[in-house]
Image (cartoon, rainbow, N blue to C red):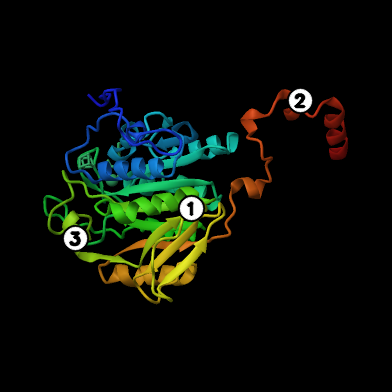
């Protein structure tokens, strides 16, 4: 059974957000993933972030490919739009949907197999096009759904459950996202909700391609000694460069920071990212330095997490294509069809 609906009845005393929904209104069906799977914690973080952001569920479109990770949209935002695509093809379906209706919030959820193997080209191209989306890679280093083969993000030398060492070079989704021009890039850990929820907040508020690589241990096939994607390994090697508070235009700033400890980044929608620095020299607005830093720390066996890069004055695919403000799917026939006189003029110009 892959889809078990939750009871519809809610306790009348549940707290509602500003748009009148309880947290439960952002949940989905009961998860059928293995107990302890990191992906379930990411679903819970998405529910939390959308509820806290007062997003009306019908304003979100969640899209995924194939894999345990790609099954998770069934387990959150049960009242949102959803599209489960063919393996590795989520980015192109998301791009098409975004072009047709720019008014929705696009949430792409994928796995390291879905995005770093069969869907690698799609991953790269939707980022370089600047599609306005939050792209979450639920990264466990294996193909969980097909019983734990190494994926392309598995570190060289890391061990499989049966003790075999991976001999191939890993693909780092963050470095690739930076190289492809993503304007918001972050890494987190499914076991660190305090870090993950604000990052999802900030990524949703960001206009442009936002990529979140979330290390999400697979308890069935990749949570043993020798794995670099296990709960123990990530807890022991997690090097967070910053902690994030997202201050919405309407929120009061309550956090107290020592001067010089915090970088303020104002995003397109007016939200302010208050980045509490943990690595004093890390500058999340310098793409090249971020890439160098990530490579150095990765070579030392560390998992760098936090908001790794943000371009505050970002643009998206609609800006590049200069599309109209009205979503294309709301234009009427008169607006879409210029008429025979205009067509004749265009044809004449081409003769
Ligand atoms: C075209 C195609 N090729 C191969 C498969 C088999 N397959 C299903 S899921 C998967 C990989 C899933 O790995 P990942 O995206 O990392 O998800 P996880 O299960 O680890 O969350 C593969 C290879 C498929 N379903 N379709
Ligand atoms: S096989 Fe792994 S990835 Fe799939 S549900 Fe189980 S723990 Fe999660
Ligand atoms: Mg995987």
Per the model, the C-alpha gap separating discs 1 and 2 is 39 Å
Q: Mark 3 or mark 1, which is nearer to you? A: 1
Mark 3 surroundings: few (<14), some (14-19) or many (≥20) residues within 10 A? some
Residue underneath mark 3: 233
Q: Nearer the viewer, residue 189 or 258?
A: 258
Does residue 118 appear in the picture of this structure? Answer: no
Q: Quadrant of the N terminus?
A: top left
Verify CB contact (< 8 Å) between mark 3 and mark 2.
no
Q: Is 2 left, or right, of 324 in this rendering?
A: left
Task: Report the residue marked by disc 2.
Answer: 334
Q: Earlier in the sequence, mark 1 or mark 2?
A: 1
The structure residue drawn at horizontal position 66% and vertical position 46%, both measured from the top left corner, is 321
Q: Is residue 76 left or right of residue 162?
A: right
Report how far apart the C-alphas of labels 3 and 2 lie in the structure.
59 Å
Q: Nearer the viewer, residue 227 or 310?
A: 310
Q: Is residue 266 left or right of residue 185?
A: right
How much space separates mark 3 and mark 1, taking CA atoms?
Answer: 34 Å
The picture places residue 208, in percent across and down from the top left corner, at 53, 51
56 and 221: which is toward the camera: 56
The residue identified by callout 1 is: 248
């Amino acid at each position: 059974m892959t889809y078990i609906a939750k009871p519809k009845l809610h306790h009348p005393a549940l707290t509602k957000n500003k748009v009148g929904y309880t947290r439960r209104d952002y949940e989905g069906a009961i998860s059928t993933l293995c107990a302890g799977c990191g992906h379930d914690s990411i679903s819970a973080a998405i529910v939390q972030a959308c509820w806290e952001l007062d997003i009306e569920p019908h304003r979100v479109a969640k899209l995924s490919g194939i894999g345990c990770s790609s099954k998770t949209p069934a387990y959150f935002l049960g009242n949102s739009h959803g599209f489960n695509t063919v393996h590795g093809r989520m980015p192109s379906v998301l791009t098409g949907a975004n072009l047709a209706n720019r008014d929705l919030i696009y949430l792409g959820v994928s796995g390291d197999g879905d995005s770093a193997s069969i869907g690698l080209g799609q991953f790269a191209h939707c980022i370089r096009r600047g599609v306005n989306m939050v792209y979450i890679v639920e990264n466990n280093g294996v193909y969980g759904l097909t019983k734990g083969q190494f994926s392309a993000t598995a570190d060289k030398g890391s061990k499989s459950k049966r003790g075999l060492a991976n001999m191939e070079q890993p693909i780092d989704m963050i470095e690739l996202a930076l190289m492809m021009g993503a304007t918001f890039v972050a890494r987190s850990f499914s076991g660190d909700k305090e870090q993950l929820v604000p990052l999802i907040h900030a990524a949703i508020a960001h206009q442009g391609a936002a990529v979140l690589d979330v290390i999400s241990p697979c308890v069935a096939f990749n949570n043993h000694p020798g794995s670099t994607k296990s709960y123990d390994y990530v807890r022991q090697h997690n090097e967070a460069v910053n902690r994030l508070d997202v201050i919405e235009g309407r929120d009061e700033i309550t956090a107290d920071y020592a001067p010089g400890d915090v970088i303020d980044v104002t995003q397109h929608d007016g939200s302010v990212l208050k980045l509490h620095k943990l690595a004093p020299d890390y500058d999340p607005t310098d793409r090249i330095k971020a890439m160098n830093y990530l490579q150095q720390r990765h070579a030392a066996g560390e998992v760098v997490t936090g908001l790794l890069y943000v371009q505050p004055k970002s643009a998206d695919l609609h800006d590049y294509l200069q599309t109209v403000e009205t979503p294309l799917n709301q234009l009427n026939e008169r607006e879409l069809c210029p008429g025979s006189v205009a067509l004749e003029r265009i044809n004449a110009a081409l003769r």
